[in-house]
Image: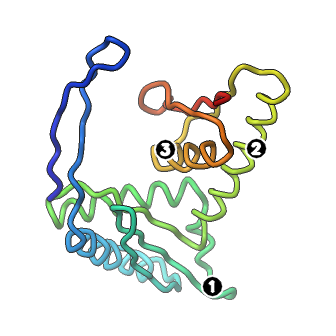
């Protein structure tokens, strides 16, 4: 189980409570992937959908991917909102079985790659607005995983970004470096 500790740090003369996580052991991540794969496999059977399940552990997370051939009907589950909902259900199933919070990532039919391409285009348009004279560019609210992808994209293009807002309104603001 991942240990969580609270630490108080001073940032710009303001004390901030920071939650830090110890690295989750690989064996726990592999178990999360196995539990998630079993859950998804049952779901696919119930829905009479075809798909192959791959499990990978990287960057401190379990990644579960559902892929299928061109003649498969898996596309009914690959819409971004559907994948997000399935991911949350899968995380709950893993948490119920293991007793530990899960940060696993679910991909159905390449939906994560498609979303990353969309985010890249969104970042490009935001940077174009900044280059045209805007001081900054705010992106729409998105999940923490998508914000992390945006932060990485922005950094690779030589700009800075920050997450702002709370809850469902949390979004990324891009600024020149």
Disc nearest the viewer among 1 and 2: 2
User: Where does residue 103 sit, x and y in percent of width and height?
Assistant: 33, 56
Q: Secondary structure at mark 3?
A: loop
Quadrant position of the C terminus in the picture: top right
Q: Marks 2 and 3, how far apart in space?
A: 19 Å
Whether residue 124 sits left or right of residue 62 in the image: it is right
Q: Nearer the viewer, mark 1 or mark 3?
A: 3
Residue 124 image label: 2
Q: Which residue is mark 3?
A: 143
Q: Is residue 134 above or below residue 86?
A: above
- Which residue position holds label 1? 72
Q: Secondary structure at mark 2?
A: helix
Q: Quadrant of residue 96?
A: bottom left
The earlier-in-sequence mark between 1 and 3 is 1
Q: Residue at x 45, y 44 (%)?
A: 144
Please state which of residues 121 and 96 is positioned toward the viewer in this rendering: 121
């Amino acid at each position: 189980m991942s240990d969580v500790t609270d630490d108080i740090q001073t940032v710009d003369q303001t004390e901030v409570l920071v939650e830090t996580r110890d690295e989750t052991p690989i064996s726990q991540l592999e178990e999360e992937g196995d539990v998630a794969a079993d859950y998804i496999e049952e779901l696919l059977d119930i829905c009479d959908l075809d798909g192959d399940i791959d499990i990978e552990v990287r960057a401190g997370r379990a990644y579960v991917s559902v892929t299928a051939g061109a003649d498969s009907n898996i596309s009914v589950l690959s819409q971004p909102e559907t994948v997000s909902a399935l991911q949350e259900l899968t995380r709950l199933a893993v948490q119920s079985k293991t007793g530990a919070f899960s940060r696993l990532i679910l991909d159905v039919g390449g939906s994560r790659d498609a979303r990353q391409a969309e985010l890249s285009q969104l970042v490009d348009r935001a940077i174009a607005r900044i280059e045209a004279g805007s001081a900054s560019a705010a992106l729409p609210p998105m999940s923490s995983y998508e914000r992390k992808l945006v932060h990485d994209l922005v950094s690779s293009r030589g700009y800075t970004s920050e997450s702002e807002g709370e809850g469902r309104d949390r979004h990324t603001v891009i600024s020149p470096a």
